[in-house]
Image (spheres, rainbow, N blue to C red):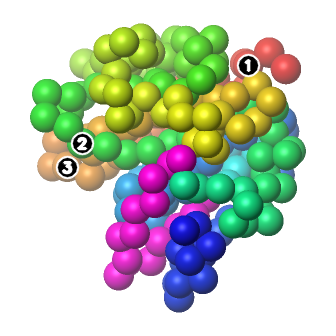
Amino acid sequence: MLADLLSHPGVEEVVALRSSFGIMAFHGGNLERGTDLVAQQAAEASGASYYAVLQPPDLRWHIPSSAVSPDDSARLAEFLAHVEVVVAVHGYGREGLWSTLLAGGANRHLATHLAGALRPLLPGFLVEDDLTRIPRDLRGVHPRNPVNLPPGGGVQLELPPRVRGQTPLSQAWHLEAVIDGLATAARTWPR
């Protein structure tokens, strides 16, 4: 499925290999708007490695995370082989959770570390890292999810529209805070 998406006109796959901490946004561009911007800027600010799939303005093709396979992309395989841990930035919207960021994924220690970096920067928002409080379909714990493939696993960070700059209630500092918190978590993660 990923190979089909990557062959579509206008779809761009971006990789920058830096440190062993990875940040990715494989639902980027027009699909989960703002996720690639958060991932790219946080990766650049922290020296982390970066992987993204960017969809053009005329496309919104969702591939479930568990179907995003390194078998379908040499660049994704190279990225996942290079990093020790990864944070995958996603966007979501759900009634009752408009101001909640979700830190799922298999690496619970990294999820706690990331949540701790984000919380002080986002007053008025909840950063949830308790898997039992995250909706089952947003937990990011499937073993084939790319966030769980590096040796140390990773975190699926789900961002509501407001912190991605996608609603009339969005403010510039929301996006900046998420970028700063993610960059801080990447820089301070013990390697």
User: Which residue is located at x 21 percent, y 28 percent?
Assistant: 97
Of residues 102 and 143, the one drawn nearer to the viewer in this rendering:
143
Q: Residue furthest bottom?
A: 9
- Let me know if residue 58 is in the magenta part: yes
Q: Is residue 169 above or below residue 178?
A: below
Category of crowding for the residue at label 2, using alpha-carbon neighbours closer than 10 angstroms: few (below 14), some (14–19), many (at least 20): some
Please, what is the three-letter code of the amino acid marked with disc 2? Gly
Label placed on residue 167: 3
Of residues 16 and 156, the one drawn nearer to the viewer in this rendering:
156
Question: Disc 1 versus disc 2: distance between alpha carbons?
Answer: 28 Å
Asked if one can make out residue 129 in the rendered structure from this viewpoint, the answer is yes
Residue 88 percent location from the top left of the image: 56, 41
Q: Main secondary structure of the magenta part?
A: loop
Dot placed on the residue nearer the N-terminal end, 1 or 2: 2
Category of crowding for the residue at label 1, using alpha-carbon neighbours closer than 10 angstroms: few (below 14), some (14–19), many (at least 20): few
The residues colored magenta run: 52-66
Residue 132 percent location from the top left of the image: 36, 12
Dot placed on the residue nearer the N-terminal end, 3 or 1: 3
SS for callout 3: loop
Q: Which residue is denoted by mark 1 in the rendering?
A: 189
The quadrant holding residue 72 is bottom right
Question: Disc 3 versus disc 2: distance between alpha carbons?
Answer: 11 Å
Q: Are marks 1 and 2 in contact (CB under 8 Å)?
A: no
SS for callout 2: loop
Please, what is the three-letter code of the amino acid marked with disc 1? Trp
Question: Disc 3 versus disc 1: distance between alpha carbons?
Answer: 31 Å
Q: Are marks 3 and 1 in contact (CB under 8 Å)?
A: no
The quadrant holding residue 11 is bottom right
